[in-house]
Image: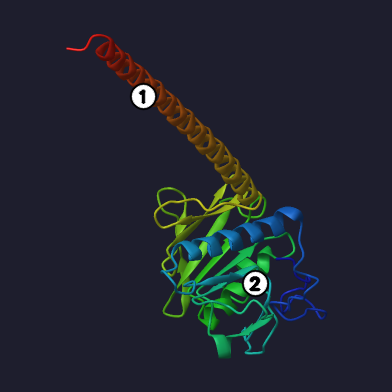
Amino acid sequence: MVTQAQARPGVGPSAGPWPPDDTEESVLGIDLHQGTITNLRLGLNGAARLYRALEQPVPWTAETQLLLLGCKHRDGTLYRTLPDVFVFPRPIDPLRGSFSLKVDGPPLLIIEVLSASTYEVDLDLEAGKGYSYARAGVAEYLTLDPTGELLDEGIRAWRLEEGVYRPWEADGQGRWQSDQLPVAVALEGMWATVYTREGRRMLREGQVEEELDRERSLRAHEQERREQEQERREQEQQLREQEQERRERAEAEVERLRRLLEERNPA
């Protein structure tokens, strides 16, 4: 995410706190940055709907760039953070604008999309976001760079083990399979992608509308096919009725002629 650039403690007399506070203005990024956040949220919440039991609420909810209160610096002082993507294991009131570690507990997963002004604080496990999220009890922490300019591997992630983040490696398909959720995260080129545990790829922004358009087109074609089939059946029924009518007229005519012959040639 984009945060105010501030020096780490000890750099100089003007050094500010590390990590610096996030602000509502600072989290705005380039289109790819924001699109990546949107795609992750769409994918994670779409997967939650797939795993929802019948007539039950969604098992988790992904939120984006809302205030998460309770994160601390190494010295114990609090600071503001607005994680790019974070997931709680329950439905979330859509009217909520902030969360608290004390009240809500830690998210299961936090994802930060790296930018030139934030990658140092996002990747810093000693004193940056990585330290704060581990101390808060966030079970999984994933950082993502869709451009590959700041992080050669594109994704770097950790899992919490005994209060410390340990490397979370990709599987054989290059996907980061979560232990907390039945989903995986990966990059397809520059596009962040979410998969279900079974391997289904969730649709990204734009693809949702494309899929809806495709479904509407398929439904329209199916409706047209059904109407044509109904028309064909009605025509066939009409032909059968006409054939039956001709048969009945022919039989009636044969019967009329038989009776006429009998009248003219009585036994």
Mark 1 = which residue? 248
Q: Is residue 254 placed above or below 179 in the rendered structure?
A: above
Quarter occupied by the N terminus:
bottom right
Residue 124 visible here: no
First in sequence, mark 1 or 2: give its number: 2
Q: Position of residue 184 (x, y in %)?
A: 47, 58
Q: Position of residue 118 (x, y in %)?
A: 70, 66
Residue 82 visible here: yes
Q: Is residue 242 placed above or below 224 in the rendered structure?
A: above
Of marks 1 and 2, the one in the foreground: 1
Q: Residue furthest left?
A: 267
Query: Along the line of sight, which residue is nearer the eye, 248 or 186?
Result: 248
Q: Amino acid at mark 2?
A: Pro
Q: Residue at x 52, y 35 (%)?
A: 225
Query: Along the line of sight, which residue is nearer the eye, 259 or 11?
Result: 259
Q: Is residue 251 placed above or below 59 in the rendered structure?
A: above
Q: Position of residue 51 (x, y in %)?
A: 43, 64
Quarter occupied by the C terminus:
top left
Identify the secondary structure beneath mark 1.
Answer: helix
- Dividing the picture into quarters, in which one does residue 177 lie? bottom left
Mark 2 = which residue? 83
In the picture, measured across the screen, residue 229 lies left or right of residue 66, that is left
In the picture, measured across the screen, residue 15 lies left or right of residue 171, that is right
Using the numbered discs, state the Cα–Cα distance from disc 1 to disc 2 in whole angstroms: 82 Å
Q: Residue at x 77, y 80 (%)?
A: 16
Q: Amino acid at mark 1?
A: Glu
- Dividing the picture into quarters, in which one does residue 25 lie? bottom right
Q: How many C-alpha atoms fall within 10 Å of the one at disc 1: few (<14), some, or many (≥20)?
A: few
Q: Residue at x 67, y 63 (%)?
A: 119
Query: Along the line of sight, which residue is nearer the eye, 89 or 258?
Result: 258
Q: Residue furthest top?
A: 265
Q: How many C-alpha atoms fall within 10 Å of the one at disc 2: few (<14), some, or many (≥20)?
A: many
